[in-house]
Image (cartoon, rainbow, N blue to C red):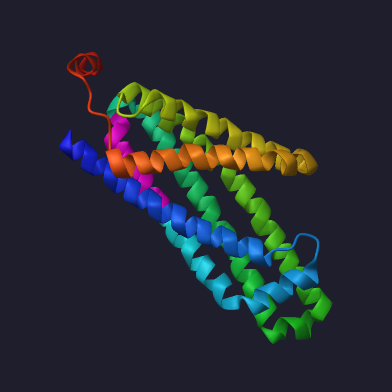
Amino acid sequence: MDSQKRLARTAGMYYLIVAVLGAFAHIVRAQVYVPGDAAASADNVVAKASLVNHSFVADLVQATFLVFVVMTLYRLLHHAGKNVARAMVIFVVIAVAIICLNMIHQLGALLVATDPAYAAAFGVQGSEALVLLLLDLQHFGYLVAQIFFGLWLFPLGLLAIRSGMFPRLLARLLMVASAGYLLDVLLQFLTPELADAVNPVLVTLFSVAEGSMLFYLLIRGVRTLRPAEQAVLAA
């Protein structure tokens, strides 16, 4: 049990790094990206070039630590279902691959906005339009990655239930959040106006579900199973 708690708390520490760096990168993106306004977006990138560059690195680091999170959770939970645990790892690896490739769009926007050669080649308005296009592509690229970032929470919740190491309410909350992520992606692509209305509720759901898991891992680690529960799982 002590070794399981150490694994859980290690996963929680990695998860905390993902949460902090991911939140920082998201806040910076929200500050510079103005959908539909090329001039404002380009001006924001220039004015906050250092922050944009730091957020680029933060996103790459948090994506790397997300792999560490799922590898640690695999070690902790694979006994509850190897195929489910493998699916969890695969979903995270796909999400991380998309996120890392998608970051090239942010780097491209930073280069175009801050290097005068692009304005000389495309004109000021042309370079601003290119900056907005790259930020648009990054925005939608994140939505694509969100499919798999949502999917991994479902097997995580299922493993949490099967293992008995986490409260059932927490496990079910993760599974509901998984469906919420997928719903958000569909709405963002199909009905953006409805997505804007529903998004605050979904973001609250995501924050509660993943925040609860993060702090449970850090503070409690795993549940101490009763002898009867241990016997059932061993069988």
From the viewer's perspective, tell me whether residue 188 is left or right of residue 163. Answer: right
Which residue does the image show at 50% across and 56% down from the upper left?
Answer: 22
Question: What secondary structure predominates along the stretch shown in magenta?
Answer: helix
The image quadrant where one finds the N terminus is top left
Q: How many marks can you see?
A: 0
User: x, y percentage for residue 21?
Assistant: 46, 59
Locate residue 79, reporting x and y percent.
27, 27
Residue 133, image x, y percentages: 74, 63
Quadrant (top left/top right/bottom left/bottom right) for the C terminus: top left
Residue 225 occupies quadrant: top left
Residue 34 against residue 195 in the figure, above or below:
below
Q: Give the range drawn in magenta.
A: 65-78
Q: Is residue 52 visible?
A: yes
Above or below residue 126? Residue 71 is above
Q: Is residue 147 among the parts visible in the rendering?
A: no
Tell which of 154 and 17 is nearer to you: 17
**Residue at the (52%, 61%) spot, across then down:** 24
Residue depicted at x 72% and y 76%:
43
**Horizontal side, residue 208 vs residue 27: left or right:** left
- Asked if the stretch drawn in magenta spans residue 11, the answer is no
Looking at the rendering, which quadrant does residue 193 occupy?
A: top right
Percent x, y for residue 197?
Answer: 74, 41
Task: Report whether 16 appears left or right of 223.
Answer: right
Query: In this view of the protein, which residue sits in the foreground, 196 or 77?
Result: 196
Is residue 61 shown above or below 141? below
Q: Image height check: is 214 above or below 133?
A: above
